[in-house]
Amino acid sequence: NPAVSMPDLERTKAALMRSPFTIYQDAYYPTETSQYAHILLPAAQWGEKTGTMTNSERVVTLCPAFRDPIGQAKPDWEIFAEVGRRLGFHKQFNFANSAQVYQEFVRLTRNRPCDLSGLSHDRLMVSGPIQSPCPETETEINRTPKRLYTDLRFNTPDGRAQFGAYYSKGLAEPPDPDYPLVLTTGRLYGHWHT
């Protein structure tokens, strides 16, 4: 819901007003952003779609849907796949379920620091949560919990950190006599995404 969650709301709303064609997907209606949309796509809630979740310790958990979506709502993967097919990419978006989407994703991670190529919905259903990385060559027998970067090397060719300079452009809305305060927003734990 970017008309609520973006840091510079006036700039966000102005951009949404200028957009010649906005497609908005959400599980709720109406929302602050839905009034800017030309097309609304009803999305399923988290409990109405099967997928994986990864926590901050890199533990991947399969989260099966516990109910069907209501009305015309669809899981995210179905919405994206249908849009892709309607744009002419039938072969690239020929998924039958979220497990197939996940298989494409884990193939893309092969031989990378975040290698998940050994995971699948089926394996997670049988084995339960599994910590990444988990390459396809790793089995339950040789799995051990992994603490990364204990060798003090970064994932760069020379193993050293690469820093980028950043120059602040100042506040988007600096204080003035009418609005003399700089406020930050707090987030509720259960509503981190908005």
Image: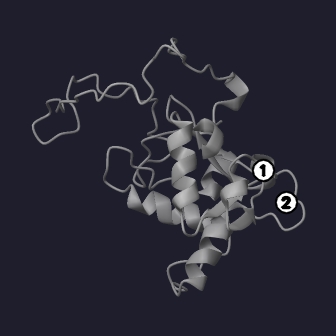
Q: Is residue 50 visible?
A: no
Residue 105 placement (x, y as % from top left): 48, 60
Disc 1 target residue: 45
Q: Is residue 83 depicted above or below 19 in this figure?
A: below
Q: Residues within 10 Å of mark 1 (few under 14, many from 20)?
A: some
Q: Nearer the viewer, residue 83 or 142?
A: 83
Measured in 3D between alpha carbons, the distance from the residue under mark 1 to the one under mark 2, in whole angstroms, is 7 Å
Secondary structure under tag 2 reads loop
Q: Is residue 74 visible?
A: yes
- Which residue sits at x=81%, y=63%? 73
- Which residue sits at x=60%, y=37%? 5
Say whether residue 106 is left or right of residue 34.
Answer: left
Q: Nearer the viewer, residue 96 or 175?
A: 175
- Which residue sits at x=64%, y=77%? 82
Quarter of the picture holding the C terminus:
top right
Residue 50 placement (x, y as % from top left): 72, 55
